[in-house]
Amino acid sequence: MTDAFCLENKTALVTGGASGIGAATCRELARAGAQVLVADLNLAAAETLASELPQAKAVAMDVTDAASIASALRSMNRLDILVNNAGIGLVGDITRTSEEDFARVMRVNVNSVFLVTQAAFPLLLASRGSIVNIGSVAGLVGVKQRFAYCASKGAVLAMTRQIAVDYPKEVRINCIAPGTVQTPFVEGYLEKYHAHEKEKVRADLVARQPIGRLGTPEDIASLVRYLCSREAEFINGAVISIDGGWTAA
């Protein structure tokens, strides 16, 4: 641990913390000195990760259920950092998106940010804490065949800015907008929709990032750590793309 971007004596909660960007974020925040709460629907996976980290604890949480969230937070007397990372995707344009699927994406990607943030807000106000929402470039630009996903990530971006306007001195809240990141999320997409041409589609995904590679979970986790640190105290209400140049092209 170095003095730069140090999070010693901070307590952090990461939703969807057991895999992908969430897991990398838990590792990075722990490396920075924070006590990390790994919140996930998959408690076994969260416990496995927590056992590998100093000062970490696994927490069972369904981010779409207010009672589950309240139960997870009940034993907490302090929270300095909240990372709203849990989310799902959906492929389909507006004509191929059912009402049920649209509602499910909004429930997991949007309602969860509202529910978890609202429940954690008293603790975050008490600590003058930091919130980082994991959005997507899909909230900034149109992505083909991602109608519901784009809508949900646009909402995450808007909620971030709105809370920053209402509470500019009480908490800090920022949104990270990743491009395509090499995670189980992406592997699941390839397996479900392109099992017969995975490598071709993977190459297309890489080509979409001008830098010439997919992002890594660690790329995103490093930015989360920075945004939660003392060095980032002047950053509030920001939406920061980390996409290999995708949205600049």
Image (spheres, helix red, strand yellow):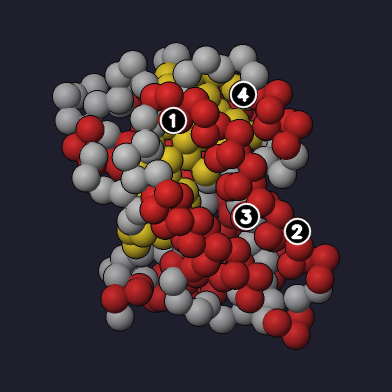
Mark 2: give few (<14), some (14-19) or many (20+) Cα within 10 Å. Answer: some
Q: Residues within 10 Å of mark 4 (few under 14, many from 20)?
A: some
Mark 1 Cα within 10 Å, few/some/many (few <14, many 20+)?
A: some
Q: Quadrant of residue 167?
A: top left
- Depth-wise, is mark 1 or mark 3 nearer the camera? 1
How many numbered markers are drawn? 4
**Circle 2: element type:** helix
Residue under pointer 4: 73
Residue 68, position as x, y percentages in the image: 73, 31
Of all residues, the one furthest to the bottom in this rendering is 95
Quadrant in the rendering for residue 99: bottom right
Q: Is residue 72 depicted above or below 139 in this figure?
A: above
Of labels 3 and 4, earlier in sequence is: 4
Which numbered disc flags the more N-terminal residue, 1 or 3? 3
Mark 1 touches mark 2? (CB < 8 Å): no
Which residue has dot 3 on it? 109
Of marks 3 and 4, the one in the foreground: 4
> Where is residue 149 drawn, in percent x and y?
61, 67
Disc with the residue nearer the chain's start (1 vs 2):
2
Q: Nearer the viewer, mark 4 or mark 2?
A: 4
Question: Residue furthest toward the front?
Answer: 166
Residue that numbered label 2 is attached to: 104
Q: CA distance from mark 1 to mark 3?
A: 23 Å
Q: Which mark is residue 125?
A: 1
Residue 77 located left or right of residue 242 = right
Instruction: Report, in whole angstroms, how far the alpha carbon at label 3 lies from the one at label 4.
Output: 20 Å
Residue beneath the point at 75% across and 58% down:
104
